[in-house]
Each structure stands twice: as structure tokens, then as C-alpha cells.
Image (cartoon, rainbow, N blue to C red):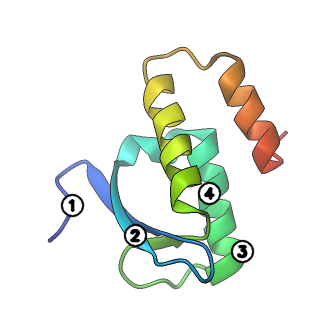
Amino acid sequence: MPPPKGCMAVRVGQEGEEQRRFVVPVAYLDHPLFAELLDMAAQEYGFNQKGPIAIPCGVDHFRHVSDVIHSDQGGAAGHRLRHFAACFGAR
């Protein structure tokens, strides 16, 4: 089933973990935390993936990052964004 308009599907899971499919708004592409996840995917799998983008992180971690991005969509990035950017090594 294709994702609804304005959304995209991603597969999430670390090596040895069953991958799960998530549908996220395309607006997440503009968020620095999601950009870090995409960088991780590019480093791990390259750019020639078929189907949903595979993101090599734990499902629980992805859910947490997704929750932060969702709350940041309201406009208040606050110190949580800086904290998570540091976790990903972004500067």
C-alpha cells in the first residue's frame, strides 16, 4: 500500500533486528535530525535503494527521534534539538 500524499515510507531497523515500516511526512526531510538518519542510511546502504529508504537505527530510537521532530514541527526547537544533534555528531 503506497503512503498517503505528502508522506513517504521508510524501513527502520539495525542489523540483526527485524525492520519495520514507518510512514512519515515528507516535511521531515527538512529536519536536521532526519537528515542525520538519511546520512546514516547513505553511508550504510548507498543511494541505490529500491522501495522505502532503509534507515539503520533501532526502532525505539527512530520512534523517539520521530516524536522530537513532530514536536519541533510546532516551531520550538529548544535545547532538545541541540541535544539530539550532539547524539548524532552534528555540529
* 2 vs 4, front mark: 2
Q: Amino acid at mark 2?
A: Arg
Work out whether 76 lies above or below 57.
above
**Which of pointers 3 and 4 lies earlier in the amino acid sequence?**
4
Question: Which residue is identified by label 3?
Answer: 43
Residue 50: x %, y % from top left: 40, 85
**Which of pointers 4 and 1 lies earlier in the amino acid sequence?**
1
Q: How many residues crowd around disc 2 within 10 Å: few (fewer than 14), some, or many (20 or more)?
A: few
Q: Disc 4 on helix, strand or loop?
A: helix
Question: Which residue is identified by label 2?
Answer: 20
**Which of pointers 1 and 2 lies earlier in the amino acid sequence?**
1
Q: Is residue 72 left or right of residue 85?
A: left
Viewer-closest of 50 and 17: 17
Residue 22: x %, y % from top left: 35, 60
**Which of pointers 2 and 4 lies earlier in the amino acid sequence?**
2
Q: CA distance from mark 2 to mark 4?
A: 15 Å
Question: Which residue is identified by label 4?
Answer: 37
Q: How many residues crowd around disc 1 within 10 Å: few (fewer than 14), some, or many (20 or more)?
A: few
Q: Amino acid at mark 3?
A: Gln
**Which of pointers 1 and 3 lies earlier in the amino acid sequence?**
1
Which residue occupies 40% across, 41% down? 27
Q: Disc 3 on helix, strand or loop?
A: helix
Q: CA distance from mark 4 to mark 1?
A: 20 Å
Q: Amino acid at mark 4?
A: Leu
Q: Tell me, for residue 3, which label it has, or none.
A: 1
Work out whether 30 lies above or below 17.
above
Q: CA distance from mark 1 to mark 2?
A: 14 Å
Q: Please say if the residues under marks 2 and 4 sit with CB atoms less than 8 Å apart.
A: no
Which residue occupies 63% across, 81% down? 15
Q: CA distance from mark 3 to mark 4?
A: 10 Å
Which residue occupies 47% across, 78% down? 18
